[in-house]
Image (cartoon, rainbow, N blue to C red):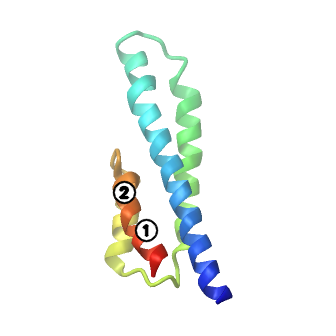
Amino acid sequence: MAAMRWHHIMIALFRYIGVAEGITTLTLFLPAMPAKCWLGYHGFVPPVGLIHGVAFIGYILAMTICLPGRGFAGFDWVRAVLATFVPFGTFLNDPFLSEATLK
C-alpha cells in the first residue's frame, strides 16, 4: 500500500514539474521573444530564459528520479523527453502520466 502511494506521489511530482516547464516555455515563446524581436525590448528574455532553463533541467532530473520502476515502456520515455522540446509538449504528455497515476 505504501509503495503504491509513493508511486502516485512520484508521478504527480513529475506532472507538476512538467506543467511548470510547459508554462515557462510558453512564457519564453509568447511574451518574451516577441517583445525582443518585434518591440526591441530585450529585458524579458534573460530572466525568463533562466527560469525556463532551470525548469528544463528540473524536468529532465525529475524524469530520471520519478519515472524509473513505474512501469513506463521505452516509448513512454521517448515521448516524455520529446515533450520538453515541443511547445505544448508537456501538456500533451500529461494525460499519459495521468493514466499512469491511476494504475
Q: Which mark is residue 83?
A: 2
Looking at the picture, tell me which residue is in the foreground, 69 or 57.
69
Residue at left offset 35%, top offset 79%: 74
Residue at left offset 54%, top offset 44%: 53
Q: Is residue 76 shown left or right of residue 47?
A: left
Residue 87 visible here: yes
Residue 92 in the image: above or below residue 36 = below
Q: Is residue 8 shown left or right of residue 80?
A: right
Tag in front: 2 or 1: 1
Query: What residue occupies the far right of the structure in this picture?
Result: 2
Query: What residue occupies the far bottom of the structure in this picture?
Result: 1
Q: Is residue 48 shown left or right of residue 80?
A: right
Residue 10 in the image: above or below residue 91 = below
Q: Which mark is residue 97?
A: 1
Mark 1 surroundings: few (<14), some (14-19) or many (≥20) residues within 10 A: some
Which quadrant of the figure contains the C terminus?
A: bottom left
Mark 2 surroundings: few (<14), some (14-19) or many (≥20) residues within 10 A: some
Q: Position of residue 97 (x, y in %)?
A: 43, 68
Give, as a three-letter code, the residue at label 2. Ala
Asked which secondary structure carries label 1, the reply is: helix
Q: Position of residue 76 (x, y in %)?
A: 36, 73
Q: Which mark is residue 35?
A: none
Quarter location, residue 81? bottom left
